[in-house]
Image (spheres, grey):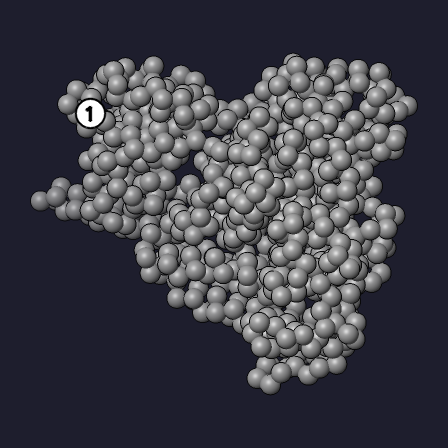
Amino acid sequence: MRKLMRASGLLKRFIFFIGLLTIAGSAYADNGYKLWLGYHAIADKKLAAQYVQQLRYVKITTGSATLNAAREELLTGFEGMLALKPQIVEKTDYPALLVGVPSSLNLPKNTISQSEIQQAGDEGYLIKSVSVNNKKCIVITGQTEIGVLHGVFGFLKLLQTQQAISALNILEYPRIMYRVLDHWDNLNRTVERGYAGSSIWNWHKLPGYIDQRYIDYARASASVGINGSVVNNVNANALMLTPDYLEKVKALANTFRPYGIKVYLSVKFSSPIEIGGLKTADPLDPQVKKWWNDKADEIYRSIPDFGGFLVKANSEGQPGPQAYKRSHGDGANMLADALSPHNGIVMWRAFVYDNNVPDDRAKQAYNEFKPLDGQFKKNVIIQVKNGAIDFQPREPFHPLFEAMPNTPLMIEFQLTQEYLGFSTNLVYEAPLFKECLESDTYAMGKGSTVANIITGKLNPKLITGMAGVANIGSDVNWCGHPFAQSNWYAFGRLAWNPAQSSATIAADWLKMNFSNQPAFVAPMTRIMLQSRENTVNYMTPLGLHHIMGVNTHYGPGPWVDNAGRPDWNATYYHKADSAGIGFDRSSTGSNAVGQYQPQVRDLFENLATCPEAYLLWFHHVKWSYKMRSGKTLWDEMVHHYYMGADSVKQMQLTWNKMARYVDKEQFQSVKQLMAVQYDEATSWRNSCVLYFQTFSKRPIPEGYEKPAHPLSYYINRKYLQAPGIGGNQ
């Protein structure tokens, strides 16, 4: 009896201990570090039991670093979601999950067709329900081990989003070749336009110390199909190409390789002078060519699968070939020749403009690059921002996308929220990306969307790419704002397949991060889909652009007129006066509309047909102009500013109902950030309405709350220690 009592007491203490662990675990359950790979326990017990029944046995090939990573990911996911440790089997004597390249699975003939495997390509995968030895099995396979790894992530997503797995036939493959994150990280660990702490790359500790964060970065990126990483700032430091730093880069490349991610470097065009001892960086100089050829050989001896170079040249003070009266083509092709023997590529940025050029800044990249169409080597891809100015909350698509049919074009999006409220504003950017991707350029007639151009559908001979300026830093949740992670996730998903919808991606991300409950997913998907439009409304409605604070780009600054050069001033862009507001880019103004195909040009040129979302981008419009709502332009603008700020309040009300579905730490973090966002939204609203009122001389319409302070208060506000450091990209 005493033994039983002691046993009973031990059991009670054990249960109590487990309870404490559970309480402690729930208190610190989710700080956002695991991103969308948290593999939370499936709350639907019936569904979880069905999954367990189907996944008790696993046959998976191991041996290589990639297949070992796939196995580890699969087991981690099963343990987290199902508390399942499957039996690893060698033969298919059981209903099993079969994972590996086809040759390793010994499947009966015709179980998987050769055409399916070939269509998957080098990075795609097939997930299929099959019968093997009269046993129902699920196959995850691909032409390559990287394809198998992508398939494992794809299968785990099915479980995370609680999909049926009894009759699967999923063939997935990327539509874009190069799917690259660009890190604007400096060697001193500052991050230009970074709002999530310092750089994750600790160059001091590399190459000897590999932070677990590097591995988890590769896991997360690979899980959404990203296959490249530019690890340093486009405003490059030549030291990056020195032997000491190349050894550090090699350590990162070795870490990323099992996950199918290649390392790229931003290079400074003047490197032959700065670290090579030459007196020139002229791309046609034989010594310069030899220097770059030798440097490429040196890199590839150390990193055989090195991806290539990213170059910012002759832009915002960066050196380039034009200093030697050479073209962008001369510079890019010289580097392409150095990389070509190693199958490397050059990503040459088209973000160029010069305040000494007496023309609309929005036109300058087109004017410089269109004449060079067809003159670049086949391993050069021109990296073009989604819009012609600079990652604004809303821009029309860049006219270069329809202007270079014989040149590979790589669209560049910005995940870090330089102009969208840093990491204090909830802004889901997929609708922004899709808005550009679905824009019809009419380059080869109707249906010539930006997406069809960058995926190579209009010219299949060209290499293809999509770049995203990373929003990643040392913050424990990686991106500063818990919801900012969704932009990293959405970028990967859309780079893999631009046809995916913003709503589907948002819903998947919410389920993988928080909860599958419809009462959570449905309202929060609506919040995410509306969030970018909210921000446009309280920052830059109706086509306004580039009216943020100077240098840091934080907060409103429509009054900025002393930034050091005209095309950095807000007044250059909004051109508000007593008559009206907006930049006249019509045929009677700068004629930027003339850079578009006639169908697009005519749409933007005509006030009656120009989408009101772009109205002030293309036209200087009278304050009294009657909008489609029946309001005057002034009243419509005020309405948008107030609607934008009010929408943040609605976001808060919705989020406050979600506490039961979200980890406490995450819930409180988002709640506090939404309060900050509301303050910032009202500051933008009040600043802009009061400032533009000095030109319109019109009252704020009845029914709208009057600003709490005079305009002078907002002009004189100082935002101390705003992150992201100065300088443009």
Q: Give x and y (percent) for residue 110.
A: 26, 18
In this view of the protein, can residue 711 be seen by the observer? Answer: no
Task: Farthest residue to the bottom: give it.
Answer: 702
**Which image quadrant: the C terminus?**
top right
In this rendering, would 305 be left or right of 45?
Answer: right
Instruction: Please tell me which residue lies in front, 117 or 77.
Output: 117
> Label 1 is placed on what type of residue?
Ser
Question: At numbered mark 1, what does the secondary structure look like: helix, strand or loop?
Answer: strand
Q: Is residue 354 above or below residue 182?
A: below
Q: Give x and y (percent) for residue 373.
A: 71, 32
Residue at point 85%, 25% (across, down): 282
Task: Farthest residue to the right: give it.
Answer: 279
Instruction: Please tell me which residue lies in front, 372 or 470.
Output: 372
- Which residue, given by chain and number where applicable, does mark 1 sit on? 131
Residue at point 50%, 26% (across, down): 260
In this view of the protein, can residue 65 be seen by the observer? Answer: yes
Q: Residue 270 appears in which quarter of the rendering?
A: top right
Task: Farthest residue to the left: give it.
Answer: 1
Q: Residue 242 appears in which quarter of the rendering?
A: top right
**Which image quadrant: the N terminus?**
top left
In this rendering, would 221 be left or right of 579?
Answer: left
In this rendering, would 91 be left or right of 629?
Answer: left
Residue at point 42%, 57% (across, down): 525
Q: Is residue 614 above or below residue 206?
A: below
Q: Give x and y (percent) for residue 574.
A: 74, 64
Residue at point 44%, 44% (across, down): 500
Q: Give x and y (percent) for residue 113.
A: 31, 21
